[in-house]
Image: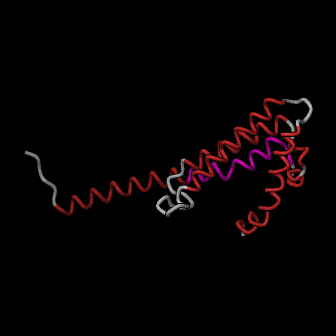
């Protein structure tokens, strides 16, 4: 004979399951956000670049820096795509899926930069690589006020 649960026990069991699921989602969210936040400082430490050197395009056009930057971009973008809770919820019309699409685009850009760095190696700096690096440096400079505002 199976004992049936009272309505109160059923509610308690559902609440326990919901709390367990929320805790799991929260831990995954926290771990991925920590990974996303720590990757750029780790990359700067790995490359040995100082903050003022970030804006100098020729510093970027080396194989080691381009490969590591492309890999970091790819990893951060893929980590963002795995977040349980997006910055823009998916149910928002039109824009809800846009952040995931942009993250996919950034991942593709990261793979492209990695390939450019690997393909051209330590030889002469190709015009294409310098153009890509210049575009990123201009974008970084343009977005700097947003970065400062986000910190405050």
In the image, residue 40 lies at what x, y percent?
73, 49
Q: Tell me: 120 left or right of 19.
A: right
Looking at the picture, the colour scheme in use is secondary structure
Q: Quadrant of the N terminus?
A: top left
Q: Nearer the viewer, residue 89 or 23?
A: 89
Q: Quadrant of residue 69?
A: top right
The vertical placement of 29 against 46, above or below, is: below
Q: Nearer the viewer, residue 11 or 71?
A: 71
Q: How many numbered circles does the render carry?
A: 0
In the image, residue 141 lies at what x, y percent?
83, 59
- What's the residue at 70%, 43% (across, down)? 109
- What's the residue at 65%, 47% (across, down)? 105
- Bounds of the magenta segment: 30-49
In the image, residue 94 lies at what x, y percent?
53, 61
Q: Quadrant of the C terminus?
A: bottom right
The vertical placement of 103 against 121, above or below, is: below
In the image, residue 113 lies at what x, y percent?
76, 39
The vertical placement of 108 against 80, above or below, is: above
Q: Is residue 116 magenta?
A: no
Q: Nearer the viewer, residue 83 or 99?
A: 99
Q: Is residue 43 magenta?
A: yes
Magenta region, main secondary structure: helix
């Amino acid at each position: 004979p199976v004992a049936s649960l009272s309505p109160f026990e059923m509610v308690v069991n559902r609440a326990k399951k919901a709390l367990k699921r929320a805790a799991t989602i929260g831990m995954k969210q926290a771990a991925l956000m920590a990974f996303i936040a720590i990757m750029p400082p780790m990359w700067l430490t790995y490359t040995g670049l100082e903050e003022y050197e970030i804006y100098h395009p020729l510093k970027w056009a080396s194989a080691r820096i381009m490969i590591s930057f492309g890999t970091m971009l790819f990893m951060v973008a893929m980590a963002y795509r795995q977040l349980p809770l997006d910055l823009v919820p998916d149910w928002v019309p039109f824009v809800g899926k846009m952040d995931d699409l942009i993250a996919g685009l950034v991942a593709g850009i990261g793979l492209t930069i990695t390939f450019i760095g690997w393909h051209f190696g330590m030889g002469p700096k190709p015009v294409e690589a310098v153009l890509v690096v210049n575009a990123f440096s201009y974008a970084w400079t343009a977005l700097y006020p947003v970065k400062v505002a986000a910190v405050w």
